[in-house]
Image (spheres, coloured by chain):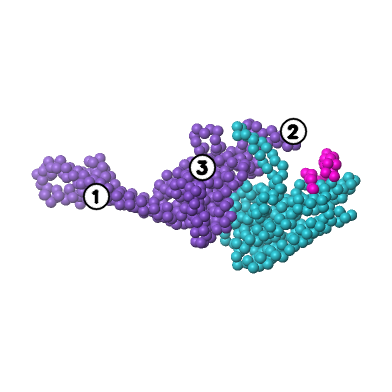
Amino acid sequence: MNALILALAYLRFNWIRSLVLVAVAALILAVPIVSQVLLSGSRAALTDRAEATPLVLGSRGSQLDLVMNALYFSADRAEPVTMAVADAVWDTGLGIPIPMNTAFETNDARIIGTSIDYFDFRNLKLAEGRGLAVLGEAVLGADVAARLSLGAGDTVVSSPQNLFDLDGVYPLELNIVGVLAPTGTPDDEAVFTDIKTSWVISGIGHGHDSVLDAQADEGDIVAAASTLQFNRITPDNIDSFHFHGDPATYPVSAILFVPNDARASTILRGRYLDPENPVQVIVPRDVIGDLVDRIFRIKTLLDAVSLIIGTAALAAIALAIFLSYRLRAREMQTAFKLGARRGTITRLLAAETIILLSSALFISFLLILAVQTRGDKIVAWLLAT
Amino acid sequence: MSQGRLTRRTMIRLTLTGASLPLSGHAFAQDEGPVIAVANYPLAYFAERLVGDLAEVLFPVPPGTDPSFWRPSIADISAMQAAQVIALNGAGFSDWTTKVSLPRARIIDTSAGFADAYIATETITHSHGEAGTHSHTGTASYTWLDFGLAARQADALAARLIRAMPQSEATISTNLLALNADLAALDAAAKALRAPLAATASHPRYQYFGRAYGLEISAMEWDAQEEVSEDQWQALEQKISESGATLFIWEATPSDDARARIATLGLTDVVFPPLAQAPASGDFISEMTKSITMIAQSLDA
């Protein structure tokens, strides 16, 4: 007991050295396990979501970009296709296409313009408010709502695509009508709107003051550059909102496709095999399977590197402790001359070492626990960035 | 009428379901029996004929409200979102659908199969800023007044209902045959009208009827149940002199004074409700038959 009190007094007196030793040891102990937790979480998150998504249609190009954007809402996007593609696969009667427009952001969260079939498909539940009903509404993922401290009745404003594009996309104020229950998936990090609302953000649809002058003859058009466009959709102005051009040409980042059965899936995939076709059909499970295999090949290398670095760091800590004992040789000699037995001095040094290692173990345990508890969110964030 | 009771009961149940969704946290779940939501009365009638008692038909537009101008409330939208099939007329009939969120997987646009047969209406062009001018082209939307097209809408609806209720395929198919026979009889009766003929209508609703049955129908922009102003009468006289119309078609029953004034202009008039909304009595087939008979009688008179 006396040895413990003396050891604590010594460590407290040399608190900077003690702190550094504890921190370094804690990190050495925690990092391999934390990386293991995150990698396992990433693998589970990637594969679970990929396996839950039968097919993705999109522009021919990087399959990984297309899947990462459509499933995990990553910033890398393939070239958009058009609603004509969604209409064409709908007309096949082979399943349900769910178009997604992921072109916009708000407050560092991706705006997902989609049809409300998406909520059925992902089995998303509301924690607060109601689902999407009219143009201009948004439902927040659980993490976005918590991070921004927003809920039903609040608003968010879409971000301009380009800071210098002052004449480009108008920011649209979205009315938040609901918050989704947490799922531990990228859906928690997203802001959902109807895909038509995303087309309003992109300027394809808009609302404005009347272009018919009440004083003018019937049918006279008086619209000009000064005609006010609305940047928020309200019950008072929603009737003025309209879309231009052929709806078949409206942009879609990707289309999730839920086939009726395995046969329908095979038939659809067969129709998009032609490499000249600008549209491709991807099986996310295959693309993500390849990605996970690569990650785990890299993980083997990372494990070896971690082992080498950890061994070196532990050796450095042992050396530091050994050198500190050497530096304290005179202090020990004094204790010995004052009547302390060699066993007492050994117990004192052992107590210091045990306290340091116990503290490091405790802190590393806390670190691992923290990562494990928030693993889903960290993985979702990592996948989205 | 049983359909009216059914529709109201369904509406109340679904509205309550919609109102309770946020509390239960199942806003996106389908948890009720088969419900077919429709955008206008013809589709409500077709759906009723096709499914009988197998499903409930939700026609959320209140009586007395023109479905063309109806705007759904949030509760209406929630109720429609909960339906297993949402039958739309297409051809721009329910322009509110471009402003609400409905599940694509459950929507059937019953006129999409003959989109190339749509009739375009007048175009409005305007511009914003530097982007140049752009246009809004309208589409005539009362497609069911061409009973051949109405039959195709019934076919499309039946196909979608069979997809949603495969166990009821035999019943729906049998009912479709009977419905199409009734629509074919209407089509034959309309084709027997003494056409070609120039007519004027109180409202531009009859484009498909005119094209299908050889009537050249110009239209006023009148509300049949409001008093017609002197300017409107003058505009009508001008239109008659230009078109040579001998028949005037009222969308709804007008005042006796208005009918008398029409007679002084040398026109025969008939009331021909296009039935976007449910009739006070009778049904789609009986009321359409009555309207066609009245037109035939007025032409023979």
Dot 1: element: helix
- Give the residue number, with chain letter if any, for mark 1: A357
**Disc 3 and disc 1 on one polypeptide chain:** yes
Give the chain of mark 3: A
Q: Can you see residue A366? A: no
**Amino acid found under the numbered disc labelled 2:** Gln
The purple-coloured chain is labelled: A
Cα distance between the residues tagged 2 and 3 = 40 Å
Q: Is residue A46 toward the left or the right of residue B74 in the image?
A: left
Figure quadrant of residue B110? bottom right
Q: Chain B is shown in which shade?
A: cyan
Q: Of marks 1 and 2, which one's residue comes earlier in the chain?
A: 2
Front residue of B167/B207: it is: B207
Circle 2: is it few (<14), some (14-19), or many (20+) Cα within 10 Å?
few
Could you tell me which residue is drawn at 85 percent across and 45 percent down? Answer: B244
The answer to whether the residue labelled 3 contacts the one labelled 1, judged by CB atoms less than 8 Å apart, is no
Q: Amino acid at mark 3?
A: Phe
Q: Residue at x 55, y 57 (%)?
A: A95
Looking at numbered disc 1 in the image, what kind of residue is underneath it? Leu
Q: In the image, which residues are magenta?
A: B216-244
Q: Which mark is residue A365?
A: none
CA distance separating discs 1 and 2:
86 Å
Image location of residue B57, percent across then percent down = 67, 60
Who is closer to the viewer here, B254 or A100? Answer: A100
Q: Is residue B82 left or right of residue B146?
A: left
Dot 2 corresponds to which residue?
A215
- Which mark identifies residue A104? 3
Label 3 residue SS: strand
Residue B163 locus on image (x, y percent): 60, 62
